[in-house]
Image: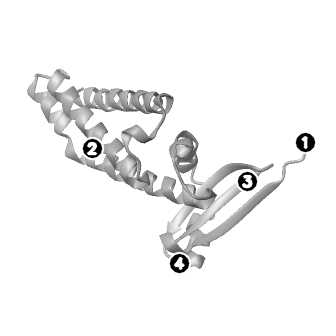
Amino acid sequence: MKVVKKIEHTWHESNDRFIYTEWENGILTGINFMQGDEYEYFIKEFNKPDDDLIIFYNAINHYVKGKDFHDVLNNVFWMYHDCIQAFKTIEANKKSKELALESHGEVDEVSIEKTDEYIDDLFTAVHNAVGTKYGDITPIQNERLNNIKQDLAKLVIEQVKQNLK
């Protein structure tokens, strides 16, 4: 089968960004973006797929509302940015690690509860980015998000345990 590859660069005025999309046989296989209107810099630094971003897009795009494809992409980009900021906050805060250390190296209910609060803040940021509320999604989508939330909490707690070693 012949592979037809198509790369597009789109300027999105209302979000002040260039968007890179890569398609293979009509399937979106790569995306990237850059804030600002410096096209030469975009070509130099962002003219390639961002592997983490396409994974995030594939996991979340069916939850995102938008009037068209580029509107959905822009909402995903804002969510991605908010998630990265939330993760940086979680990492920088280290309160879970301190709580675990205070409990003699054990991850206790307090540190788990604090981790859950951070995860809730992350998901609130995601919902705020796309203008949805918890009730705006179907029960199946809500269950998937809760599973992601639980997996994320486990990862954070596992990281805390590794930091204690």
Q: Sequence order check: which comes first, mark 2 or mark 4? A: 4
Looking at the image, the residue that sits furthest to the right is 1
**Contact check, label 1 and label 2, Cβ < 8 Å:** no
Indicate which disc residue 23 carries: 3
Please name whichever residue, 123 or 111, is drawn nearer the observer in this view of the structure.
123
Indicate which disc residue 1 carries: 1
Label 3 – label 1 distance at C-alpha: 15 Å
Kind of residue indicated by mark 3: Trp
Label 2 – label 4 distance at C-alpha: 31 Å
Please name whichever residue, 21 or 107, is drawn nearer the observer in this view of the structure.
21
> Is residue 40 positioned above or below 140 on the image?
below
Indicate which disc residue 37 carries: 4
Q: Picture quarter containing residue 11? A: bottom right
Q: Secondary structure at mark 3?
A: strand
Residue drawn at x 20%, y 29% is 113
**Residue 34 visible in the picture:** yes
Q: Sequence order check: which comes first, mark 4 or mark 1? A: 1
Whole-percent x, y for residue 160 in the image:
26, 31
Kind of residue indicated by mark 1: Met
> Is residue 70 positioned above or below 79 on the image?
below
Q: Secondary structure at mark 1?
A: loop
Give the residue at mark 2: 90
* CA neighbours of label 1 inside 10 A, class few (<14), some (14 to 19), many (20+): few
Kind of residue indicated by mark 4: Asp
Whole-percent x, y for residue 158 in the image:
32, 27
Kind of residue indicated by mark 2: Ile
Quadrant for the C terminus in the image: top left
Whole-percent x, y for residue 119 in the image:
30, 37
Q: Sequence order check: which comes first, mark 1 or mark 2? A: 1
* CA neighbours of label 2 inside 10 A, class few (<14), some (14 to 19), many (20+): some
Looking at the image, the residue that sits furthest to the left is 102
